[in-house]
């Protein structure tokens, strides 16, 4: 099965700085890569996703890049704010598969200091 | 639009007691459904998944079981809870072209 590794496990940045979280995957058949944000005590929520036919996707202050050759993808948050503090999970899957399972990384605890 | 309901939100149960957590989905048919557990400060552990009524697959051997009696209903159960069953339980469904939508979760404390 797919194996997703995520780094770093914790990340602290000053407000206004950028934050980058990196993930690698093992299965070349994976073609869908979502990112989830989980605030303390709440459910994970999808914040951005990318499909394998796209190299980069941006939504305001967040962006995701994908390198299919190297099998890695990254989340970039610019101009960080204290409300960006949360646990972020990357995931990989094959779109349209019967099972449709997402394989998650272990998560990154991001802390943004004011 | 699709919505997912999960209850109860919190639960405190003694060791050895039974457990039943319920998840229902609205606005879609034949959804893929999943149960995840998250220990405090840890990642998301897949417990069970189901692609249809009566079809349950288990990811890890444990003290828990799952059932899918109806198309949009997924139930997580235990006959006798252990201390190690404590955690945050999340139900999720997946649109085949997109990612998961998670339920609001049940925080279970076994005492």
Image (tube, coloured by chain):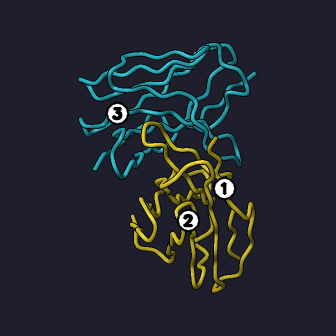
Q: How crowded is mark 3: few (under 14 residues within 10 Å), some or many (20 or more)?
A: many
Mark 2 element type: strand
Is B15 drawn above or below residue A7 in the view shown? below
Give percent across and percent down for residue B52: 43, 62
Q: Residue B89 carries which label?
A: none
Q: Chain B takes which shade in the image? A: yellow
- Of the two numbered discs 3 and 2 in the rendering, the one whose residue sits closer to the viewer: 2
Q: How many labels does the image show?
A: 3
Image quadrant containing the N terminus of chain B? top right
Is A35 left, or right, of B24 in this rendering? left
Please name the residue shown 64% across and 77% down the image. Answer: B19
In this orientation, which residue lies closer to the viewer: A79 or B4? B4
Please name the residue shown 61% across and 60% down the image. Answer: B89
Give percent across and percent down for residue B102: 59, 48
| Quadrant hosting residue A59 | top right
Is A44 drawn above or below residue B19 in the view shown? above
CA separation, marks 3 and 2?
32 Å
Q: Name the residue under label 2.
A: B74
Q: Residues within 10 Å of mark 2 (few under 14, many from 20)?
A: many
Mark 1 element type: loop
Q: Chain A takes which shade in the image? A: cyan
In this orientation, which residue lies closer to the viewer: B49 or A81? B49
Q: Mark 1 points at which residue?
A: B105
Label 2 resides on the chain identified as B
Q: Earlier in the sequence, mark 1 or mark 2?
A: 2
CA separation, marks 3 and 1?
28 Å
Q: Do labels 3 and 1 share a chain?
A: no
Label 1 resides on the chain identified as B
Q: Mark 3 points at which residue?
A: A24
């Amino acid at each position: 099965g797919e194996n997703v590794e995520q780094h770093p496990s914790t990340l602290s940045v000053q407000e206004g700085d950028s934050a980058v979280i990196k993930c690698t995957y093992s299965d070349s058949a994976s073609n869908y890569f979502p990112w989830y944000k989980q605030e303390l005590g709440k459910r994970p929520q999808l914040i951005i996703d990318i499909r394998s036919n796209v190299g980069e996707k941006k939504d305001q202050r967040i962006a995701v890049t994908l390198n299919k050759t190297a099998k890695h993808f990254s989340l970039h948050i610019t101009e960080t704010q204290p409300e960006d503090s949360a646990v972020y999970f990357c995931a990989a899957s094959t779109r349209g598969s019967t099972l449709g399972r997402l394989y998650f990384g272990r998560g990154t605890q991001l802390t943004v200091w004011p | 639009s699709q919505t997912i309901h999960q209850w109860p939100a919190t639960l405190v149960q003694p060791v050895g007691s039974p457990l039943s957590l319920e998840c229902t989905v609205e606005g879609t048919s034949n959804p893929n459904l999943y149960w995840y557990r998250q220990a405090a400060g840890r990642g998301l552990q897949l417990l069970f998944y189901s692609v249809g009524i009566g079809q349950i697959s288990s990811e890890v051997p444990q003290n828990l079981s799952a059932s899918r009696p109806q198309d949009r209903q997924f139930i997580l159960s235990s006959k006798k809870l252990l201390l190690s069953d404590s955690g945050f339980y999340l139900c999720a469904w997946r649109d085949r072209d997109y990612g998961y939508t998670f339920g609001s979760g049940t925080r279970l404390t076994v005492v």
